[in-house]
Amino acid sequence: MTVTEHRPENPATSRARILAYPLGAALLVATGSIHLVLALTTYGGIPTIGTLFLGQAATSLGLAVALLALRRPLIAAAGALLLLATLGGYLLALLVGLFGFREVLTGAGVAAAVVEIAGATVLTAAAAPALRIPAGTRRAAPAVVAALALGATVPSLATSGGPGGVARAAGGGPVVEVVHLPRFGAVLADHRGYTLYVLSIETGGRIVCRGGCLSIWPPLLVPGSVRRVVAPHEVGGHLGLVARPGGVEQVTDNGYPLYTYAGDGQPRQAAGEGIDSFGGVWYLVSASASSPRATPLRQR
């Protein structure tokens, strides 16, 4: 008969695991709150992405309550998996796009990623007793999770592009096209056919859309070597350039910086028309007007 010796858990390890429950719950609340605020203020209008943000917030907050009430390793494991999945979705959206949405590197996004890595590490420590692996491997699990998460995140953040898309150069400058929408007539679009917008308060080249705004409203940028912009003859306004923070150049129309909208999943859509956010209202740009167009386009 073989008797397996049961070694009691080291007191320091036991205390650390006990503290991991409230700390993990706090980090779940933090990430859930971040996603809830972003869903309500920024991402809610983007198809699928807004729903995912609300779902992440509800699940994070629910797991935090359950973790504090029940203190079960399996709940901690579920929380760790949720945070790792959230981090993976963020990196995927940042690098290649997710459900037609391309994330932009911002300070808020980096802060959220740090919370998710910390939360996944702490919750893995709380979940370790439930893992059916050798004791030495269980002790190393939190460090392994942290190392893998950081190993995926740091290179992704370092190689991700800046906000906006660079317009195709042709004849010495980027191309701004004219597209015809059933409800709005001829409006400006980028070279891919995605409609362009202006923010009502950005008069005279004033830049208000920064940080998290750029995830939703990517600016129309040009290479640094471009000194003028090329537009079809149908465009009645004056196209120009304005320097954004960081030294990149953004295309303007009659002094209003031009943006696309992340909620437009395909070319020739206009889901951003009339949205009130980031201090002003977003409008399509009429191709025929020769004066500033930060006013609503009438349906035709």
Image (spheres, grey):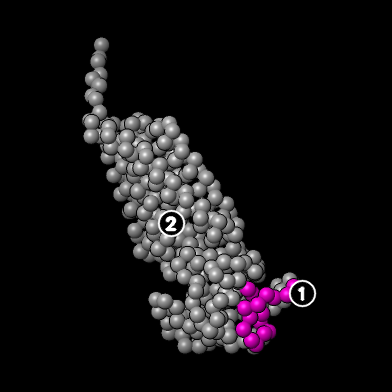
Q: Is residue 250 left or right of residue 110?
A: right
Residue at image location 48% in from the left, 58% down from the top: 93
> Mark 1 vs mark 2: which is more N-terminal?
2
Distance, label 1 to label 2, CA atoms, is 41 Å
Residue located beneath label 1 in the image: 300
Q: Is residue 217 left or right of residue 297?
A: left
Q: Where is residue 193 drawn, in percent x and y?
A: 61, 73
Quarter the N terminus occupies: top left
Magenta includes 288?
yes
Residue at image location 60% in from the left, 71% down from the top: 281
Q: Where is residue 298 drawn, in percent x and y?
A: 73, 75
Region in magenta? 283-300
CB contact under 8 Å: marks 1 and 2:
no
Q: Where is residue 87 drawn, in percent x and y?
A: 42, 52
**Res 91 label:** 2
Magenta includes 244?
no
Farthest-out residue, top: 1
Front residue of this view, candidates 186 and 71: 71
What's under tag 1, amino acid-wise? Answer: Arg
What's under tag 2, amino acid-wise? Answer: Leu
